[in-house]
Amino acid sequence: MHFNSLSRRHFARIAAALGLPTLPAEPLRAASHRDDRPTDRRFPDGFIWGTATSAFQIEGAVSEDGRGPSIWDRYAHIPGKIADGSDADVACDHYHRDTEDVQLMKALGTTAYRFSIAWPRLFPDGLGAPNPKGLAFYDRLVDELLANGIAPFATMYHWDLPQALQERFGGWRSRDTAEVFADYVAYAAGRLSDRVRHIFTVNECARLVQLGYGLGYDAPGLTLPQGELNQVRHHVALGHGLAVQAVRAHGRPGTKVGPAENIVACIPAFDAPAHVRAAEIATRELNAGYLTVMLEGNYTDAFLASAGADAPKYTAEDLAIIASPIDFLGLNVYKPDQYAVAADNEAGFALAPLPTSFPHMYSDWLRVAPEAMYWSPRHAARLWNVKSIYITENGTSATDEVDADGRVWDLDRVMYLRNYLTQLQRATAEGVPVQGYFLWSLLDNFEWQDGFEKRYGIHRVDFKTQVRTPKLSADFYRETIRRNGVA
Ligand code: FCB
């Protein structure tokens, strides 16, 4: 037995003996007198509050209504690849429970939802004839969201590449994949942008390249040498640019489009002007392969010099495509990546080594530094003069023990969210143009190689019964949204 559950029972017994009330089974409601506190950490009026998910992680129904297999279906079924031996064949069964899940969003008070469209539902072979039944699901979902006052924000690619394209082109190793990606985006934008007014191109280019093609932890599980990896990187960035152009050409006028990138978060060791400047320079260099080229239209000199003979092959036209003007920047912010300090060297910065004792959340990789949420959008706004930013993901895994009443008191997740949101509020109060926040995630779901072992939801999902239960963090988020300020 874990000490925590022992102590909880122990205190419950003492409470009962003293006649004190035990923990409420009902969600906690904040007292109304708090509303008027002058110190309330308020967000700008009209700030958008949402939750985020991705198709492969929640939908299930992998062979229904003509959906083709994706690289993640294949990968998840290779023995040993997923920590708990699970797959996403059913996942959260969202494909059949979308109506119920929209009601969860409504109960939170969210006004937006970021979901992804499964390319293999719309084009089972990745290209060729579209599958109308696949589109019909998203048509229904979008209508359901709008009927409940929730604006749909759709991601076009959240890693579930049609398996057929892996076989035919080698996936993102070939620029053909970038080109057929644009065809799929053109079709999806053409059909949905009368209602879906915000589109994200690619989710986390950086991770899909590094983990999928470099380290082999994500599908398709390759470990390419540096030169080939840089070429994959270039094709993914190109895919983003072509997708922006496809939305412009085929979406309804005024449809807004941008990337959702996991910015390499560079934080000044502390807030002194020289370290802040160093962190800004580091942000530009360490994001050279994605955000910098997308926003500046060039690979930086340092990036090309350090790649040397392994630099990607590209044309000036490619760079212009990659840098197609975007309407907003989506940033996924979870953790600090680097701490920068001023340095008297050519680069203009140095990176401080991260101590092994640096704290992290339940997932080892999820180092916790709320200030990443302040500096990341601030650096992006200053470096690239970005006028509109969305935080497209932020959240954490937690152990999420269930108590006797079926409640999850995920105080660690609440602590994490409260602190990150406090830093986001600090940024907006200083005028950093962040317009909305999407919490990862609405539901516990299939967490890639971690399978179902790492839960990120603010609703618990019992994967045997598919019952969804709000956690304490859902109550926290509802209250934050209600007051438009950190609860
Ligand atoms: C991000 C992914 C998302 C989820 C979270 C925890 O890198 O975009 O799908 O896995 O991490």
Image (tube, rainbow, N blue to C red):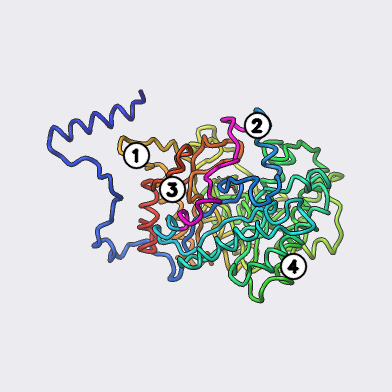
Please report contact status of discs 4 and 1: CB closer than 8 Å, yes or no: no
Where residue 38 sits: x, y (%)?
30, 65
Label 4 vs label 2: CA separation?
36 Å
In the displayed structure, would residue 285 be above or below residue 213? below
Where residue 214 sits: x, y (%)?
74, 39
Amino acid type indicated by mark 1: Gly
The residue that disc 4 covers is: 245
Label 3 vs label 2: CA separation?
26 Å
In the displayed structure, would residue 189 be above or below residue 155? below
**Corner quadrant of residue 127:** bottom right
Task: Tell me the residue at 67%/42% (across/down).
Answer: 72
**Corner quadrant of residue 186:** bottom right
Label 3 vs label 1: CA separation?
14 Å
Assess mark 2: CB under 8 A from ligand 1?
no
**Corner quadrant of residue 77:** top right
Mark 4 vs mark 2: give the one in front. Answer: 2
The residue that disc 1 covers is: 406
The residue that disc 2 covers is: 81
Q: Which label is found at residue 458?
A: 3
Mark 2 vs mark 1: give the one in front. Answer: 1
* Helix, strand or loop for disc 4: helix
- Specify the segment rendered in magenta: 82-102
